[in-house]
Image (cartoon, grey):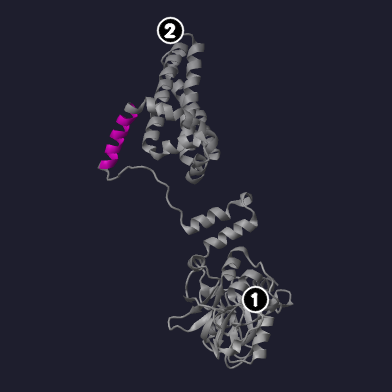
Amino acid sequence: MGDEVPLSALFGVLFILLALSAFFSGSETALMSLNRYQLRHKAREGHRGARLAERLLARPDRLIGLILLGNNLVNFSAASLVALIALKMGGEPAVAVGTLLLTLVVLIFAETAPKTLAALHPERLAFPAALVYYPLLKLTYPLVWLVNMCANGVLFLLGIRTGNAELTALTREELRTIVFEAGSRISTRYRQMLLSILDLEQVTVDDVMIPHNEIIGIDLDDSAEAIERVIAESQHTRLPVYRDKIDNVVGILHLRRLANLASYDLKSGDLGGLLEEVYFVPEGTPLSTQLVQFQRRRERIALVVDEYGDIQGIVTLEDILEEIVGEFTTDPADDTDDVREESANCFVVDASASIRELNRSQHWELPTDGPKTLNGLIVERLETIPEAGITLDVGGYPIEIIESDDKRILSVRVRSRRAVAEEAVE
């Protein structure tokens, strides 16, 4: 019968078989290369090809069985057809040459090229292929099921269990990588906000709170004039009210309530319903947790306490939001910056400045896994309060003590890594 079929027809059938082989090879790579999260997103948007591809990938053993069944069928058929063509054209000696040529053609045009294309553009090939494979799997299910039963039986003997394929949950660091490498798909500002949200679990209230010695509040033991001056000059709408010291806090005063009163007397000791109950949070609370607590309790301000109940600082909802979106208010109290540029790559810094704020504003990389302030970091390294003139290296930044007293370091001179690198080159 092979002698009655013209060579042109045989070559036509061979071309079709090679095209089918390329389709099976490329579609297999494309389907397995799909980003499962992007696939789920498109499926939820109603993309028909994505929905079918997601269903097929839910049982990859069946999909692979179908693809391999089709691929092997067309490859073996192509090999038989080449042998027939070779016999017609040159007899038995031509069969070996035909086999070699078929191997090269399959390797280049039916394997390498389509798989490379599919790996570069998986969705372009996977979604149309899913439209073909889904009904084809229905038609050939008994044969595919038999093949899978045999294959799964072999895996079972090797101690491997098969089941439904599920999306593996991404870790926080993996999510950071995805967001960071999103490139132009997400604007720089939004990308930074997303990264800040992912970092909320690593940042605690201790990192953003106003420390104990910087809390501005109303001391009921002060004179009426002093209290009125604090209220008039306050840049905050809520102030803690205490007696003698902040550890004896009695409540939180919302200044808007005073504005609604014709007259008030904070010295009378009878504040009635003016004060709000104080909300205490333990130190070390992650910002992600505290943000949820603020929302749940409908609070905007909290006092941070240590394990002994002593007040360590004050944290507000605004502090947490600024960790996500950056500074969005201008506080006149902050006009006196903690950093003053003395010369190129050399800065005079207030030692009480927050290390995280310095890293953020100056793009430095001072260590943040210990003390929260520059003063604390230096004292921890030296294990003593240094005198003026002492210089040390902290994380690659030369730091010179400019001024200190018996209790703390007041100011330092910090030289950036760029200055150190430039001097090394010279």
- The quadrant the C terminus occupies is bottom right
Residue type for callout 1:
Asn
Q: Identify the mark nearer the N-term, 1 or 2.
A: 2
Residue placed under numbered mark 2 in the picture: 3
Q: Is residue 87 above or below residue 374?
A: above
**Figure quadrant of residue 366:** bottom right
- Extreme residue in the top direction: 4
Real-space Cα distance between discs 1 and 2? Answer: 106 Å
Q: Quadrant of residue 349?
A: bottom right
- Identified at 34% across, 29% down, the residue is 144
Return the residue nearer the eye: 34 or 315: 315
Image quarter of the N terminus:
top left
Callout 2: SS: loop
Q: Is residue 152 magenta?
A: yes
**Could you tell whether 155 is left or right of 55 in the image?**
left
Residue 21 on the magenta segment: no
- Give the image location of residue 73, x and y in percent: 39, 24
The secondary structure making up most of the magenta span is helix
Amino acid type indicated by mark 2: Asp
Left or right of 228: which side holds 134? left
Residue 8, x across and y down, in percent: 51, 12
Name, please, the residue furthest toward the front: 262
User: Residue 68 placed where, x, y %?
Assistant: 39, 31
Q: Report the residue that reaches farthest toward the left.
A: 157
The residue carrying pointer 1 sits among few (fewer than 14), some (14 to 19) or many (20 or more) residues within 10 Å by Cα, namely few
Determine which residue is flagged by label 1: 260
- Is 116 rendered above or below residue 260? above
Magenta part of the chain: 143-156
- Side of 62 relative to 203 (left or right): left
Identify which residue, 21 or 93, lies in the foreground: 21
